[in-house]
Amino acid sequence: MSPGITQTLVDLGLEEKIVGRSPFCNGVDESVPVVGDYHDVDFERLLTLNPTVVLVQETQAPKNTHLKQLYEGGAFRLHYWPLDSIDDIEQVYNKASDLFTDTPRDFVLSIDEVFSKERVLIVTEGSDVSAGLCFGSGTYLDDVIKTMGLENALERDGWAMLSLEDVAKLNPDRILVVSDTPIKEESVKGIRSLNIPVLLFEHEHVLIPSSQVSNVASALQEQLVAVQ
């Protein structure tokens, strides 16, 4: 019940073992039944599928009490796995590999420290007055840019919605706008008005924390090197 966990299982070659998914899990075939998401689970459908293991992305939100009751009653094994940072993604990859494969593999992030300490602000598409959702310290894209030698202009932990005024106060050297679909110029008009260099980065997996972050990081590094 997590797009990131689902994609990681697929990357490990475990797609045939997946019997249910969330409506946001695009990495698996659409024929796999939707059983709900973290907040709204279709328990009747879930139990009909008779899973042996249920995997949930751990967040700060309270855990689903009924899932816990079913686990305690022996309906299935239940794992809550966080997916905030690169370390979390690596742990999910390694745990899933150990649990479900005969030949465990290790997660590898192949990027280098190739940049100076430029301060970068990572944002999603915004509006005329908002910078959109921003990636702060401890998030997986924060880990990616720091591994490259860059600094995150947003030092607070986790994700935050920032106004254009907030961004102006941070005064980053560069703004990195990330999206899993083609970025509309209208959505970055506000950011561009700040007269701070803007780089648009599009990748189908950039907004989902999964083992695909390795490919995301490589593509991002290549694009950043090209504009140096």
Image: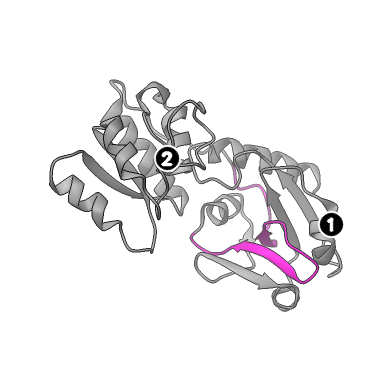
Viewer-proximal residue among 215 and 9: 9
Query: Residue 226, image x and y in percent?
Result: 79, 42
Q: Is residue 185 above or below residue 136?
A: above
* Residue 117 appears in the picture as rendered: no
Residue at image position (30%, 31%) is 49
Q: Amino acid at mark 1?
A: Glu
Hey, what amino acid is under mark 2? Ile
Q: Position of residue 85 (x, y in %)?
A: 46, 53
Magenta span contains residue 145: no
Is the Cβ of the residue at disc 2 closer than 8 Å to that at disc 1? no
Which residue corresponds to mark 1?
186
Say above or below: 44 vs 195. above
Q: Could you tell me which secondary element the residue under label 2 belongs to?
A: helix
Q: Between residues 7 and 29, which one lies in front from this camera angle?
A: 29
- Residue that numbered label 2 is attached to: 5
Name the residue at the left extreme: 73
Sequence order check, earlier mark of 2 and 1: 2
Protein image colouring = one colour
Q: Residues within 10 Å of mark 1 (few under 14, many from 20)?
A: few
Q: Quadrant of residue 90?
A: top left
Q: Position of residue 95 (x, y in %)?
A: 31, 38
Q: Residues within 10 Å of mark 2 (few under 14, many from 20)?
A: many
Boundaries of the magenta span: 112-138
In this view, 11 is above or below 228: above
Q: Nearer the viewer, residue 63 or 166?
A: 63
Q: Which of pointers 2 and 1 indicates the residue nearer the eye?
A: 1
Res. 42 visible in picture: yes
- Whether 123 is among the magenta residues is yes
Farthest-out residue, front: 44
Residue at disc 1, secondary structure = helix
Residue at 80% x, 65% y is 191
Examine the rendered structure and indicate whether residue 68 appears above or below residue 94.
below
